[in-house]
Every structure is written in C-alpha cells, then in structure tokens.
Image (tube, helix red, strand yellow):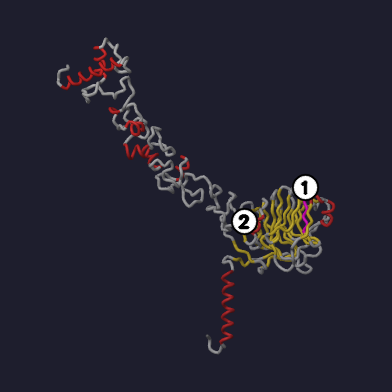
C-alpha cells in the first residue's frame, strides 16, 4: 500500500482498478475504433449517394444507426429514378413508425400506405433516440421483414417487386419530384451500411450485426464501413462501388458504435460457403461448400465430412479405410461386419470372401471356421472335390473335408467308394466282389446289393460273402 493513503481509501481504489481491468479484458480483442457517417446535425443538409446499385431480388439492406430525432419524416434508404424521381424502394421512419414502399411512381411517402396498400408497409416499431440500433430489412417472394437489434420488429407483404434498374441509391435523404434530396433527412450517425443480393435469414441478421465485415462474404453486394475514403468519397469494401458525400455529410473519426472486426471466415455463426452449415454447426472448412458434416468422404486427401479424418482413416482397424468400407457397405466401426471370424480387411484383401456374408460359399461352414479350424477353401463349397460339401463332411459324415477319398457318396451298394488299387478293408465286400457274386448267381439275377428277393436268398448271399472273405484271408481266393 502506498504511504499516506488510508486503508479504506486504498481498498476502494483497488476495487475500482480491479473492476476496470475486468471490463477491459471483457472487451472483444478485435473491437474496431470505428469512424461513422454524420448526417444533418442542426440545420445542415446532406446525404450519402451510394450510386446505381443492382442487388436484384431478393435483397437485404442493413446499417447501424443513431437517431437524434424520430418525429416527422426521416429516410434511411431510397432507390430513386433521378429523371422522374419515382421510388423503386424506400425505407424510412415516418410519424412514429416504419414505412416501406416499392415502385411508387408519384406518391408522397405519407400517402403511400393508403393509396398503394399492396405495394407498401406501414407499421409501428421499436426504434428510439436514446441508443444506437441495428436496422435490417429483408425482402423475398413478396415478404417484407424489418429487424431492430436482431429481433423482428415489423413484417408485411407487397404485390410489387422493385426493379431498381438505373435508380440511384441514396442514404439519409428523400426527393419527392423536387429534383433535390433535401426532404426526409436522417439526423444522426450511420455505420456498417450493407446491401445484400439475397434475403438474410433472421439468424444471419442476428449473427452478423455486431461484426464489421470484410466485403467478401457470400451474397454481399455492397459494404460501406465508413473507414476507407478520400476527399468526398467513401469506398465500398466489395470493390464495386464508390459513394459520394453530399452537402454537410461527413465521416467522423469519433463513433458511437463499437463493432468486432472480422478478418474473414471467422464469424462462426455464419455459413460463409452456403453449404447449410456454419462453423458453430460443425463445418470444418467454411471456404469449401463440398466440406460439411455428413458429406460423402472422397479420395482427395480432405476431411470432407468433418469427422476429423480424411479417406485414409481406418476407424475400426480392420485394414480397410472408412472410404473403402462405405463403398463396400461394411460397418466402419466393426472390424468383422458379418461376424464370421475374419476381419473385413482379410476377407477382401487376403481370402477374397464376401465381408457381408458369414458363409461366402454356402457350404454350411462360416468363412472363419473354414480358414482357422478346418483349412478348407471358404470360396469352394467342396474343397477336396470329393462330391460332398465341406459342411456335410464335418457335421454329418464326420469325414475330412480336405480328403476326397473318404467322401461318403450315395451309390448302388450303399457303401463307401474304395478307389482302384488294393482293398483297404478285406472284411468288406467291395464292388468288384459284388460283381463276382452276381456272376456266380446267374449274371446279376441275384439282388444281393439291394433288398433280398427272399429271406433264403439273403441268407445264401450272406453266407457266401463270409466264405469269400475267409478264403481271401487264407490266401485261397484268387
């Protein structure tokens, strides 16, 4: 504590300094010490002539304003044919409320709402002289909306659509067939005057109103921030127009307004590229309309869908990139989509099986069982070519699905096929022996290999077969 300052006084000073520091830190770091357009203070007369603008329809106009007086008639925007002084567009505050008119050929603004009700809007509003306000008007498809400080203040419809043509746009004054712009003067300050070639949404109006923009924003037709100019001109930041100061209108270095200066693509509530997503909504690249949440991932090295990864990412670690899995229809978050025991990547790259089917060859064994347990081919239903499917060999016959010699095939004997060399089982009558038996009983008249014709015949055949077997074991049968 400094010497000589009482404790109470020092405590108050410290509290005040702390509050000041907090308030300074709370200010936006990029707040701009702005200039503003000063119009018609006292008895002076002046306006800003914006030039021949052509925003088309739909369109939006907006500005930050202060009003020294709101009685009588005060003009914000007017687009006028300087040869006939007919208005294609007018926005002003008349007798305590808003007035908008389109394509007014020869009517005074005060008479428009009664004379041309389908082409005008007259409505009460919340504008005051006590503070600065942001004012915006949007027009689209016959619908008019006026916003004050980002909130809808008045609305209506019009059967007329402004053509603009070669009309001159004027800020802060009106001309009713007098040849001069000396009526309906706006008295106060204006800044960040914008004209858009599209109708901003209510969210966009509220989003952008506190920012000083760059002039490159999507759909921005003209922008005067009152910062750039020389002599009697004020430059438009889009680079297309130049406004002229007329009469007492002047640009002052002092300003009532404090806006945050945008450097471009940094207003996160605004959809710069028109893809339907702002930065706040998850758009990871506001300079590219093909990049947004849910977009199709492309093979271009870019994170198209804003999930934090490009097409080389393999989310489930199965050896396939997410882009490849999307093309195949497999699950990007499941390494084994069909639950057959093989990863999707191995099925595609190693075994050539279908990662969406657990049994690619439909032989009764899953692809994983064929590869990992039985050593069979998951793409061939009969790996050993023995005539019996792999699944039937495993589950029904109990034979080896990789050995063709043990496949149990249905034949006339009802016995296994033996092959051509040797007799692996001398206790069993093989087909050759059956043929010999048939010859011994009259060239096949005996039905020894099928149902016996009589119990006696069956007994004789059985007895003879046993004798043949015994003789072969004794080496007495050729």
Q: Which residue does the image show at 47% across and 40% down from the upper left? A: 329
Q: Secondary structure at mark 1?
A: loop
Q: How many marks?
A: 2
Residue 189, compared with residue 451, is above or below; it is below
- Residue 247 x, y percent position in the rendering: 75, 63
Residue denoted by label 2: 215
Q: Is residue 112 left or right of residue 217?
A: right
Question: What is the span of residues highlighted in magenta in the rendered image?
Answer: 98-102
Disc 1 from disc 2: Cα separation = 31 Å
17 falls in the magenta region: no
Residue 101 left/right relative to 462 = right
Q: Residue at x 15, y 18 (%)?
A: 476
Give how far across and how far down residue 43 sits, in percent: 79, 68
Front tag of 1 and 2: 1
Among the two numbered marks 1 and 2 on one chain, the one whose residue lies closer to the N terminus = 1
Can the viewer see residue 173?
no
- Position of 47 with respect to 229 (left or right) is right
Main SS of the magenta part reads strand
Residue at the spot of label 1: 159
**Of residues 223 and 279, which is closer to you in this image?**
279
């Amino acid at each position: 504590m400094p010497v000589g300052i009482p404790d109470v006084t020092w405590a108050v000073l410290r509290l005040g300094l702390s509050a000041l520091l907090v308030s300074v830190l709370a200010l936006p770091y990029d707040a701009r010490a702005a200039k503003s357009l000063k119009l018609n203070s006292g008895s002076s007369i002046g306006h800003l002539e914006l030039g021949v603008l052509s925003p088309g329809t739909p369109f939006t106009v907006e500005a930050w304003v202060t009003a020294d007086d709101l009685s009588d008639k005060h003009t914000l925007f007017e687009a006028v044919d300087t040869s006939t002084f007919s208005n294609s567009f007018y926005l002003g505050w008349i007798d305590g409320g808003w007035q908008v008119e389109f394509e007014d050929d020869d009517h005074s603004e005060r008479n428009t709402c009664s004379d041309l009700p389908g082409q005008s809007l007259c409505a009460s509003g919340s504008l005051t002289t006590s503070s600065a306000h942001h004012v915006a008007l949007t027009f689209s498809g016959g619908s008019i909306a006026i916003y004050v400080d980002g909130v809808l203040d008045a609305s209506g419809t019009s059967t007329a659509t402004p053509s603009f043509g070669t009309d001159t746009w004027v800020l802060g004054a009106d001309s009713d067939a007098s040849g001069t712009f000396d009526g309906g003067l706006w008295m106060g300050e204006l800044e960040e005057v914008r004209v858009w070639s599209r109708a901003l949404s209510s969210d966009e109006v509220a989003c952008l109103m506190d920012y000083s923009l760059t002039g490159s924003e999507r759909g921005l037709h003209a922008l005067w921030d009152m910062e750039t100019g020389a002599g009697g001109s004020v430059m438009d930041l889009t680079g297309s127009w130049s406004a002229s100061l007329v009469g007492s209108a002047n640009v002052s270095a002092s300003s009532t307004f404090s806006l945050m200066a945008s450097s471009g693509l940094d207003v996160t509530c605004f959809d710069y590229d028109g893809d339907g997503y702002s930065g706040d909504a998850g758009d990871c690249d506001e300079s590219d309309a093909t990049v947004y949440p849910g977009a199709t991932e492309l093979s271009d090295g870019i994170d198209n869908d804003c999930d934090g990864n490009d097409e080389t990412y393999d989310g489930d670690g199965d050896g396939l990139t997410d882009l490849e899995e999307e093309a195949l229809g497999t699950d990007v978050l499941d390494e084994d989509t069909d639950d057959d025991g093989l990863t999707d990547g191995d099925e595609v790259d190693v075994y050539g099986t279908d990662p969406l089917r657990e049994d690619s060859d439909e032989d009764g064994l899953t692809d994983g069982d064929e590869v990992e347990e039985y050593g069979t081919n998951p793409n061939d239903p009969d790996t050993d070519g023995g005539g019996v499917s792999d699944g039937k060999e495993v589950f029904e016959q109990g034979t080896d699905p990789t050995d063709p010699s043990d496949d149990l095939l249905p034949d006339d004997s009802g016995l296994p096929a033996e092959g051509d060399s040797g007799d692996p089982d001398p206790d069993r009558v093989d087909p050759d022996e059956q043929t010999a038996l048939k010859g011994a009983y009259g060239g096949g008249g005996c039905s020894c290999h099928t149902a016996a014709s009589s119990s006696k015949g069956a007994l004789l055949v059985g007895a003879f077969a046993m004798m043949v077997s015994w003789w072969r074991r004794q080496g007495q049968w050729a």
